[in-house]
Image: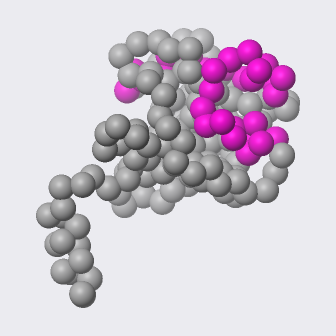
């Protein structure tokens, strides 16, 4: 099947494709930046800043945009640290997150910063031992952030 036929077939399929997202692992003074991102409210679940990839922009460019929107920070994007898949075993949701190691090059966390999308309600740095006292995703987050190397975390069920 040629490329055009393959694209046409993919468009006609009823099964949604996995969503692609990028996330930032930002360690500052050996503390990891996490955000409370929950559309329409506040949750006790924390995650790395980032979000969905927009077509026509590179993964690093998407991540730079997302971190700035959610946290008001400018970052440089380094190497890949983790590939994580979330899915809903009872529904069509499937998302592939690519986590990059990032470094802050400008900005500070400010309490008055507002995410234009209204999804991130809080942002905070956590020491590794603090993670034992909060709920976060993905499960492999501490290993990916502090232990180095590249990790793959397959098909972790999404938490609501």
The answer to whether residue 113 is above or below residue 105 is above
Q: Quadrant of residue 9?
A: bottom left
- Would residue 31 appear left or right of 67 to someone viewing this image? right
Q: Position of residue 77 (x, y in %)?
A: 65, 51
State the residue at coordinates (70%, 54%). Answer: 151
The answer to whether residue 68 is above or below residue 37 is below
- Of all residues, the one furthest to the bottom in this rendering is 2
- What span is colored magenta in the figure? 117-146
Q: Position of residue 48 (x, y in %)?
A: 61, 34
Q: Position of residue 107 (x, y in %)?
A: 65, 30
- Would residue 137 appear left or right of 8 to someone viewing this image? right
- Would residue 138 appear left or right of 147 to someone viewing this image? left
State the residue at coordinates (40%, 47%). Answer: 94
> In this orientation, does residue 23 appear?
yes
Q: Position of residue 22 (x, y in %)?
A: 52, 47
Give the position of the N terminus as an image quadrant. bottom left
> In this orientation, does residue 53 appear?
no
């Amino acid at each position: 099947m040629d490329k055009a036929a393959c694209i046409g077939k993919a468009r006609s399929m009823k099964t949604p494709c996995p969503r692609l997202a990028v996330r930032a692992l930002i360690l500052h003074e050996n503390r990891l930046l996490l955000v409370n991102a929950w559309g329409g409210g506040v949750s006790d679940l924390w995650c790395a800043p980032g979000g969905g990839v927009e077509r026509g922009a590179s993964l690093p460019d998407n991540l730079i945009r997302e971190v700035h929107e959610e946290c008001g920070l400018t970052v440089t994007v380094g190497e890949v640290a983790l590939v994580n898949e979330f899915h809903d075993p009872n529904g069509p949701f499937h998302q592939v997150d690519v986590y990059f190691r990032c470094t802050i090059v400008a900005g500070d966390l400010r309490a008055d910063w507002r995410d234009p999308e209204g999804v991130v309600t809080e942002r905070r740095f956590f020491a590794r031992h603090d993670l034992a006292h909060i709920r976060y995703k993905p499960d492999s987050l501490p290993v990916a952030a502090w232990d180095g190397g590249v990790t793959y975390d397959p098909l972790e069920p999404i938490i609501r």
